[in-house]
Amino acid sequence: MDKLKIGIVGCGAIGSSLAKVIVKEFSKEAKLGGLYDLDKKKTKDLSKKLSGSSLAMDNLKQLINKSELVVEAASAKVSWDIAKYALASGKDIMIMSVGGVANRLKQLTALAKKNGGRVYIPSGALCGIDAVKAASVGKIKKVTLTTTKHPLSFKGVKFVEDKRIKLSGIKKDTLLFSGTAREAVKFFPQNINVAAVLGLAGVGVNNTYVRIIASPKATKNIHEVRVEAEAGNISTRTENILHPDNPKTSFLAVLSAIATLKQILQPVKIGT
Ligand SMILES: NC(=O)c1ccc[n+]([C@@H]2O[C@H](COP(=O)([O-])OP(=O)(O)OC[C@H]3O[C@@H](n4cnc5c(N)ncnc54)[C@H](O)[C@@H]3O)[C@@H](O)[C@H]2O)c1
């Protein structure tokens, strides 16, 4: 069987880890088609580290042309455009910046069907997505996500700045936001991809409720999910270690992308 050609957009914490794993651990089943980052130095450095400099692409078009599966690990601002472009070019896409496609499920499905492509959205930094998917085959009454992070994780978030919240002055657990997952991904685009994944897997982003808490005691990113469903109640709690290269990203999110890739490449699929 031919090796699957994988192209990576975004050579940050997630993109670099995936690229390394593809070269080191999945070399029998897959190979890198190319790497592309807005930051040319990042693209070149990673490319050199992995295989001379032949993998560095100058633009998105080139990257997509060289790939069968495109991995988006760049930004919620561009994930929908990248997905659209990849699918329209007949390629498969794995999306990490899920906030950018949170309300695009219908369009993604239509584009994938029209062009014979596949869309992969890893569970990311959240456990329980398997059960939420299964429960949503029946009836789900309510889905709530409570995310707790250290105040400084919200540095640079416009919503927090607009509300003039002084993050360094937070001395006790403080509710920063409560609303729908759709609003959460809009206001916290880099912090709350998990809300988008949870919405897409269950009852949609308009019907999934999110609370975001800044806690000065938090040393991990904690996500608690509570689902009330016809099939029973589901409660999960994920305590995420932060990725050393990007403290906004949980280490589990990187591993989740790798596990999704493994599912794509291997014949046996475990879990819902
Ligand atoms: N699904 C999840 O659970 C989950 C978890 C963590 C992070 N994420 C998301 O995944 C994405 C990648 O995360 P990361 O930790 O690797 O981030 P990162 O900041 O370490 O890396 C992102 C890279 O993408 C590049 N980039 C930005 N815009 C680009 C564009 N238009 N074209 C090409 N490159 C571009 C940046 O230069 C940077 O090198 C982020 O959007 C993040 O919010 C998702």
Image (cartoon, rainbow, N blue to C red):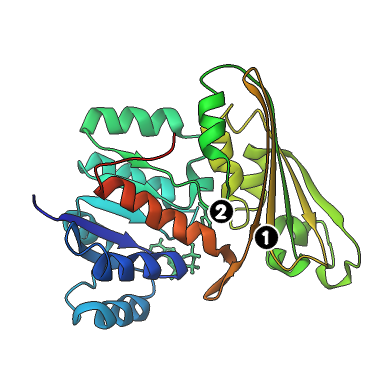
Q: Amino acid at mark 1?
A: Asn
Please give the residue where the numbered disc 2 appears in the rendered image: 125
What residue appears at the point 61 percent right and 66 percent down from the top-left corner?
Answer: 241
Q: Is residue 205 above or below residue 95?
A: above
Callout 1 secondary element = strand
Q: Amino acid at mark 2?
A: Ala
The image quadrant where one finds the C terminus is top left
- C-alpha separation, residue under disc 2 versus residue under disc 1: 9 Å
Q: Is mark 1 within 8 Å of ligand 1?
A: no
The one nearer the camera, 39 or 47, is 47
Residue lying furthest right: 171
x and y percentages locating residue 10 in the rendered image = 39, 65
The one nearer the camera, 81 or 10, is 10
Q: Is residue 122 above or below residue 47?
A: above
x and y percentages locating residue 269 in the rendered image = 33, 40
Q: Is mark 2 within 8 Å of ligand 1?
A: yes
Q: Is residue 58 visible?
A: no
Total marks in image: 2
Of the two numbered discs 2 and 1 on the same chain, state the one appearing first in sequence. 2
x and y percentages locating residue 243 in the rendered image = 55, 70
Crowding around mark 2 (Cα neighbors within 10 Å: few <14, some 14 to 19, many 20+) is many
* For residue 75, side relative to residue 142 (left or right): left
Q: In the figure, residue 16 lies in which quadrant?
A: bottom left
Asked whether disc 2 touches disc 1, contact meaning CB atoms under 8 Å apart, the reply is yes
Please give the residue where the numbered disc 1 appears in the rendered image: 221
The numbered disc on residue 242 is: none
